[in-house]
Amino acid sequence: QVQLVESGGGLVQPGGSLRLSCAASGSIISSNFMGWYRQAPGKERELVAAITSGGTTTYADSVKGRFTISKDNAKNTMYLQMNSLKPGDTAVYYCSAIYSRVQYWGKGTLVTVSS
């Protein structure tokens, strides 16, 4: 059974940092595409960052230079290090992976950036 479980969200002040984790079940951590999406209130879900099985990464323009995606296959975990957070980063963050042509989603973790 494929499972993705996010953790690490919370309330942080502008300029602060958070690290999100996504614990993946089974061999999904080795899938060719894993990524972090976010959805702010009233907005569509958007791709924030993605990583391939070979380690190639891509980022949305809005987070380039501030966010870093990585994964540890030995720990079956993907991460999103978020620095210099802004109020505009407030959203529910979702972990996702494409495995055997199916896109799987976690339930999300809320990140709130506010003073």
Image: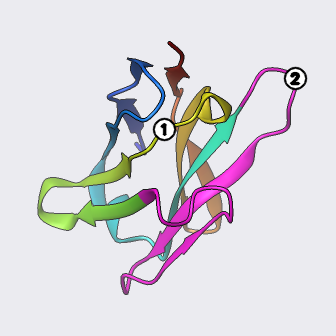
Q: Is residue 42 toward the left or the right of residue 78 in the image?
A: right
Which residue is pictured at 86% across the width and 32% down the height? Answer: 43
Q: Secondary structure at mark 2?
A: loop
Residue that lies at the very extreme toward the left in this rendered image: 74
User: How far from the left and from the top, in percent, is residue 77?
Assistant: 26, 51
Tell me the CA gap for discs 2 and 1. 20 Å
Q: Mark 2 is on which residue type?
A: Gly
Which residue is pictured at 40% across the width and 46% down the height? Answer: 82
User: How far from the left and from the top, in percent, is residue 6?
Assistant: 39, 33
Q: Mark 1 is on which residue type?
A: Leu
**Which region is colored magenta?**
40-67
Quadrant of the image containing the N terminus: top left
Q: Secondary structure at mark 1?
A: loop
Numbered circle sitting on residue 85: 1
Q: Nearer the viewer, mark 2 or mark 1?
A: 1
Numbered circle sitting on residue 42: 2
Which residue is pictured at 28% across the width and 63% down the height? Answer: 71
- When asked about the image quadrant of residue 16, the answer is top left
Give 101 or 90, whichever is nearer the viewer: 90
* Residue 99 part of the magenta-drawn span: no
User: How far from the left and from the top, in percent, is residue 81?
Assistant: 34, 50
Above or below, 56 relative to 83: below
Give 58 or 35, whichever is nearer the viewer: 58
Q: Earlier in the sequence, mark 2 or mark 1?
A: 2
* Residue 64 part of the magenta-drawn span: yes
User: Which SS type dominates the magenta stretch?
Assistant: loop
